[in-house]
Image: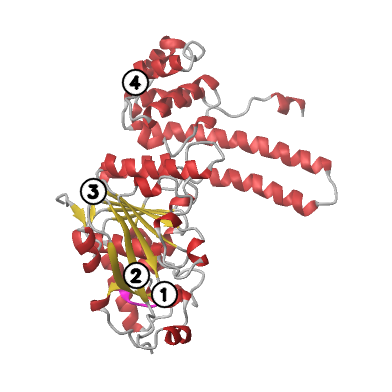
């Protein structure tokens, strides 16, 4: 037992030094590893200081090299403690190749998780020795400690929609019963494009609504329309829904088959053919989905930069803004959300793409009549309104009023069932106004009113 306590925890100084050396010689290395490891994953304190210096330079969009890293460490009064310029030169000289930086980073991450596991087992052992009557709470805490480590090992990344279509076809799921550059991204909705002139590159577009009014569906529909109408390359960051759920929503919308039928695999032969056709159409498009549930804004930025280098993106969708973690460690959530909105606007400018970010609204619309949202309702707004180039709200009268109440108040007007009002409340480069779309809830699809088709009859 004594020998076990005296053993050093797992670590690999060579891998740590290879990571920081790669950052100083390869400008692309930061994009490859930023979402894999964090400063706390480094065992050697000096290496962690150097890594943090590299991150600070990157956050300020400054070059990362021996000179700038040495200057940043000097600014922090850590250069000598980190080994001085001689150590920075040594690790760079001894680096075999920066090509394998992801491999080095995963070694650092793996050893960090092993050290975390050792710490967790010690905590679990201590709780077990203490005993007590609350066995369930001890077991629950032990499971939390282990699950936290398992979650940290899962680094999400983009998945091409084709793979999700293949997976949907091959594995129905547990619910089954058996390139030129375009100047603007069209939303695919005639009246909305008339007001907006399309989504401009380098613009941040906010789609905001109360829960269950369709903000995710509208963002997905715009992404789909851009991919089909303009062959746009689209990146979707989904922090709320799993990638397969998004894929099934796209499939329901594209095939015209009720989403419940798709989940259950309950289609007749003709409907099955429509699903297969829709899968083929979707699979041919450049749509990439990252469904990592917990992400910092810096991780989103790194992944977007990397995919943009590979595929030259046109549109980025983030669902949704309030689920993103900021880099600050303070407890002021308004300031954190403000930092996130500024970063998303910065990302749109850096990559010259349109960025759509879904956002929750506060409960204020529920507490007034009419319930039409306004800019002040943006939840934890901070600088969201200021940073956004366009802000659109979704409002549906049929969510707040039933048919009987409507007829009493509006006897001369038909009940607006399935009619969504898209309110362009802010448009930095053009007019504001309202657009009406039809929302087909069973297909999670928005449509121009003029293009409405009756629901297909199911046998």
Kindly identify which residue carries mark 4. Answer: 65
Which secondary structure dominates the residues rendered in magenta?
A: loop
In x, y percent, where is residue 118? 66, 35
Write down the quadrant of residue 421 in the picture: bottom left
85 left or right, relative to 350: right
Kindly identify which residue carries mark 2. Answer: 421
Kindly identify which residue carries mark 3. Answer: 201
**Quarter of the image where the N terminus is located:** top right
- Furthest residue to the left? 180
Q: In the image, which residues are magenta? A: 255-259
**Callouts 4 and 3 close, C-beta under 8 Å:** no
Write down the quadrant of residue 57 in the picture: top left
Q: Residue at x 43, y 80 (%)?
A: 266
Q: CA distance from mark 2 to mark 3?
A: 25 Å
Kindly identify which residue carries mark 1. Answer: 397
Q: CA distance from mark 1 to mark 3?
A: 32 Å
Q: CA distance from mark 2 to mark 4?
A: 52 Å
Q: Earlier in the sequence, mark 1 or mark 2?
A: 1
Q: Residue at x 33, y 40 (%)?
A: 346
Q: Residue at x 47, y 57 (%)?
A: 240
In x, y percent, where is residue 12? 52, 26
Q: Earlier in the sequence, mark 2 or mark 4?
A: 4
User: Is 327 above or below relative to 353?
Assistant: above
Q: CA distance from mark 1 to mark 4?
A: 57 Å
């Amino acid at each position: 037992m004594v020998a076990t306590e005296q053993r050093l925890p797992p670590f690999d100084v060579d891998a740590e030094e290879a990571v920081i050396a790669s950052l100083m010689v390869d400008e692309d290395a930061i994009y490859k590893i930023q979402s894999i490891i964090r400063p706390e994953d480094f065992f050697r304190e000096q290496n962690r200081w150097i890594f943090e210096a590299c991150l600070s330079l990157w956050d300020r969009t400054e070059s990362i090299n021996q000179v700038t890293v040495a200057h940043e460490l000097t600014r922090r009064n850590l250069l000598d403690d980190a080994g001085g310029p001689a150590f920075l030169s040594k690790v760079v000289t001894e680096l075999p190749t920066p090509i394998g930086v992801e491999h080095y980073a995963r070694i650092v991450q793996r050893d960090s998780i092993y050290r975390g596991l050792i710490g967790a087992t010690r905590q679990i052992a201590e709780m077990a020795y203490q005993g007590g009557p609350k066995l369930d709470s001890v077991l629950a805490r032990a499971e939390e400690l282990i699950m936290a480590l398992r979650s940290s090992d899962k680094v999400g990344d983009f998945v091409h929609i084709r793979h999700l279509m293949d997976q949907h076809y091959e594995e129905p799921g547990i619910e089954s019963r058996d390139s030129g550059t375009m100047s603007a991204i069209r939303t695919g909705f005639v009246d909305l494009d008339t007001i907006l002139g399309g989504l401009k590159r380098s613009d941040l577009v906010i789609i905001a609504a109360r829960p269950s009014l369709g903000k995710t569906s509208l963002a997905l529909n715009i992404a789909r329309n851009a991919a089909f109408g303009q062959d746009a390359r689209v990146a979707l960051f989904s922090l709320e829904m799993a990638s397969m759920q998004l894929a099934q929503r796209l499939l329901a919308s594209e095939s015209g088959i009720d989403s419940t039928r798709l989940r259950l695999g309950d289609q007749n032969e003709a409907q099955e053919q429509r699903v297969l056709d829709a899968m083929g159409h979707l699979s041919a498009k450049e749509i990439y989905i990252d469904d990592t549930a917990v992400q910092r804004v810096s991780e989103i930025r790194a992944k977007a930069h990397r995919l943009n280098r590979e595929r030259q993106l046109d549109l980025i969708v983030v669902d949704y803004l309030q689920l993103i973690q900021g880099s600050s460690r303070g407890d002021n959530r308004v300031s954190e959300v403000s930092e996130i909105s500024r970063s998303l606007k910065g990302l749109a400018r850096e990559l010259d793409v349109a960025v759509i970010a879904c956002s929750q609204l506060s409960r204020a619309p529920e507490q007034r009549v009419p319930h039409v949202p306004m800019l002040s309702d943006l939840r934890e707004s901070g600088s969201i309104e200021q940073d956004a180039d366009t802000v659109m709200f979704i409002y549906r009268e049929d969510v707040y009023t039933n048919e009987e109440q409507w007829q009493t108040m509006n006897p001369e007007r038909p009940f607006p069932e399935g009619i969504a009002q898209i309110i362009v409340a802010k448009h930095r480069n053009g007019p504001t106004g309202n657009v009406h779309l039809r929302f087909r809830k069973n297909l999670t699809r928005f449509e121009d009113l003029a293009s409405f088709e009756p629901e297909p009859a199911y046998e």
